[in-house]
Image: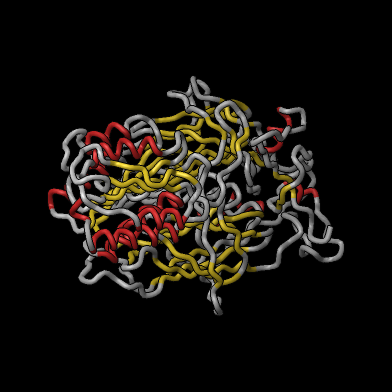
């Protein structure tokens, strides 16, 4: 099924390797070597360098304001995030070679950065082009690399020309982004800074006063530090079906350019359910058109290939790019006599749509492929639960402060309760909620009155989406709104699912079909990039009310007893669809009749054992034992 205008689904992408399993680590490099996932502060090769104008025009109150802004930024950045500081114009009164690295890019040292900026004495020229070139060399190779340039004027040196430097750096293939902040700038300087940001696949932020400088510099820096943390084995999609690389259940990373199509092959049996999900991760807030996005198609490979599933997720707005994704599934018919039920080779194509004026940077892709074994012969699954439910949870009480994850891989785990978080313009936060057999997930995200910029006429949107353990999108069965226009006034978005039932996979209608596997479910909340033009604070506050309703059953079988009741042991059907999982020792055998997981594939390839050596670490997920077992 094709989903247009799917911004809420653009919050997320694939889960994969194991329907119902959340893979904790297993970041595999190009050669198949395991690499540890990035820590809370970002990956080891990620980095941010702030480039601060310290020319003569910044002397006095402007430099004091810049110092306060840098201090606020370093206080807001996550612990350990690699951060450096470069200045230009502070060494001598005249000189187009006057640029210095005051603090190298290294794990965040807040005090050192504050002391470094406090000692700057503006006096010289404005060699922006040279400073950008040097700043790119300051950053580590690989990973996400961000330059945030703060300036109150135009380049005064002319060679190298700043926009040309930004374009060359961005075209070198490195994952580099250049954001610019114009502090009390006039037309000529603003145009140059906008040009640098556009050429550098970044965003321009206007700061007409000291308070806005703090706000905009904080936003730019935090969006870099809180960017989606990709995980997976490197793969290069083919240019056609014949050259598509073969995938086994697991998680992968690739990239895709404007107008490009990537192809991947999977070998399916005649009975298992296959979930193929894709998350595209453009740089947040960069230029994007309404119809930009990704389009997925799963097809056979015979003489007359039949489309077995399709999906499309487009931004549905032109405020700026955000995380976006889609998913397709091959679910064999109940009688296993469908045209796409046959065993054999299938291909997944991923196409990127992009308007001529949109940002041209390549988008990282995260792909997840999960294979779910059929329900055991001789067992009877409970009937589908397709009835409409209640509106999202109306819980009351004091909220607990949390910080959502950057994506599926580090989603913040929540239970029933009231939680408080913040969203930056252009940001999506992710949360994981365990939902058992027979239970349903409901939630609401409430935005209160937000302090607005004086005289602002800007508007934006808020959106939400929910996903099952296979990262398949979940439909709403409560009548809640998943996307609404945002003007800084109170509003709520939310979603309520039907109870999780094995046979929902064959139900008619979107509201029930995705709610088919127990385990970790995902909630994604997004704030549109346009909110930067209306909110006075760097981030916007949100209260998330989460409820998991209904009695959890011991399994998906017909007549299953409540989980935890005497005699409510795990049946064959529950083992076959165990979305209820936990980590076990590396190389532990998979349950008979369960999912084929990424861990299973690695263990099989390694003879059932995984060696851990040096920085190599593979975390395999097994099954969570029944409570009290």
Query: Where does the image place residue 16, in percent across and percent down from the top left?
Result: 59, 42
Query: Where does the image place residue 541, in percent across and percent down from the top left?
Result: 42, 68
Q: Residue furthest bottom?
A: 397
Q: Residue furthest right?
A: 567
Nearer to us in this view, 147 or 495: 147
Q: Residue furthest left?
A: 187
In the picture, the quarter occupied by the C terminus is: bottom right
Name the image quarter holding residue 452: bottom left
- The answer to whether residue 307 is visible is no
Note whether 248 is above or below 486 in the view shown: above
- Give me the residue at 72% from left, 48% from top: 583
Note whether 136 is above or below 453 in the view shown: above
Q: Is residue 236 left or right of residue 575?
A: left
- Give me the residue at 55% from left, 76% from top: 395
Q: Is residue 317 left or right of residue 391?
A: left
Nearer to us in this view, 46 or 229: 46
Note whether 216 is above or below 310 in the view shown: below
Nearer to us in this view, 8 or 216: 216
- The answer to whether residue 397 is visible is yes
Note whether 76 is above or below 505 in the view shown: below
Q: Residue furthest front?
A: 92
Query: Where does the image place residue 341, in percent across and percent down from the top left?
Result: 61, 34
Query: Where does the image place residue 132, in percent across and percent down from the top left?
Result: 29, 39
- Give me the residue at 45% from left, 52% from top: 11
């Amino acid at each position: 099924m094709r989903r247009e205008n799917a911004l809420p689904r653009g919050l997320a992408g694939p889960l994969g390797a194991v329907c119902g399993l959340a893979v904790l680590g297993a970041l595999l490099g190009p050669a198949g070597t395991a690499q540890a996932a990035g820590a809370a502060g970002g990956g080891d090769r990620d980095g941010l360098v702030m480039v601060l104008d310290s020319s003569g025009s910044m002397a006095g109150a402007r430099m004091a304001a810049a110092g306060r802004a840098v201090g606020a930024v370093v206080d807001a950045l996550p612990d350990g995030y690699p951060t450096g500081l470069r200045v230009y114009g502070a060494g001598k009164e005249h000189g187009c070679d006057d640029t210095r690295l005051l603090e190298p890019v290294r794990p965040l040292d807040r005090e050192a950065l504050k002391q470094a900026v406090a000692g700057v004495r503006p006096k010289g020229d404005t060699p922006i082009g040279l400073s950008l070139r040097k700043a790119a060399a300051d950053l580590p190779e690989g990973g996400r690399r961000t330059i945030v340039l703060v300036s109150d004027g135009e380049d005064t040196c002319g060679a190298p020309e700043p926009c040309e430097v930004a374009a060359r750096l961005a075209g070198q293939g490195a994952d580099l982004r250049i954001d610019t902040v114009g502090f009390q700038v006039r037309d000529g300087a603003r145009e140059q800074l906008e040009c640098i940001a556009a050429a550098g696949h970044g965003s321009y932020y206007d700061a007409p006063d000291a308070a806005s400088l703090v706000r905009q510099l904080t936003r730019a820096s935090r969006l870099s530090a809180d960017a989606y943390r990709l995980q997976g084995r490197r793969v290069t999609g083919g240019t056609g079906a014949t050259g598509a690389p073969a995938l086994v259940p697991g998680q992968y990373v690739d990239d895709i350019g404007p107008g490009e199509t990537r192809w991947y092959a999977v070998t399916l049996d005649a009975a298992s359910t296959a979930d193929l999900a894709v998350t595209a991760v453009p740089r947040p807030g960069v230029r994007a058109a309404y119809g930009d996005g990704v389009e997925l198609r799963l097809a056979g490979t015979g003489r007359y290939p039949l489309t077995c599933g399709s999906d499309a997720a487009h931004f549905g707005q032109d405020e700026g790019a955000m995380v976006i994704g889609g998913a397709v599934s091959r679910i064999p018919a109940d009688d296993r006599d469908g045209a796409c039920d046959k065993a054999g080779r299938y291909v997944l194509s991923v196409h990127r749509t992009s308007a001529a004026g949109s940002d041209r940077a390549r988008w990282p892709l995260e792909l997840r492929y999960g294979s779910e074994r059929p329900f055991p012969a001789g067992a009877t699954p409970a009937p589908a639960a397709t009835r409409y439910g209640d509106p999202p949870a109306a819980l009351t009480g004091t909220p607990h402060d949390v910080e959502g994850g950057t994506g599926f891989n580090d989603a913040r785990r929540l239970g029933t309760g009231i939680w408080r978080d913040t969203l930056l313009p252009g940001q999506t936060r992710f949360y994981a909620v365990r939902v058992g057999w027979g239970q349903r997930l409901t939630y609401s995200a409430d935005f209160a009155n937000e302090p607005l910029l004086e005289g602002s006429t800007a508007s934006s949107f808020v959106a939400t989406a929910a996903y099952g353990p296979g990262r398949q999108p979940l439909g709403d069965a409560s009548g809640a709104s998943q996307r609404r226009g945002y003007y800084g006034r109170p509003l709520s978005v939310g979603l309520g699912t039907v109870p999780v039932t094995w046979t929902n996979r064959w139900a008619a209608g979107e509201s029930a079909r995705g709610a088919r596997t127990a385990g970790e479910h995902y909630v994604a909340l997004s704030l549109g990039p346009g909110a930067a033009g209306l909110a006075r604070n760097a981030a916007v506050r949100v209260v998330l009310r989460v409820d998991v309703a209904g009695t959890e059953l011991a399994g998906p079988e017909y007549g299953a007893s409540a989980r935890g009741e005497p005699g409510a042991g795990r049946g064959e059907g529950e083992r076959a669809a165990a979305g209820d999982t936990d980590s076990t020792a590396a190389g532990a055998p998979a349950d008979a009749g369960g999912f084929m997981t990424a861990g299973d594939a690695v263990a099989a390839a390694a003879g059932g054992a995984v060696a851990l050596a040096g920085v190599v670490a593979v975390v395999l997920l097994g099954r969570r034992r029944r409570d009290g077992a």
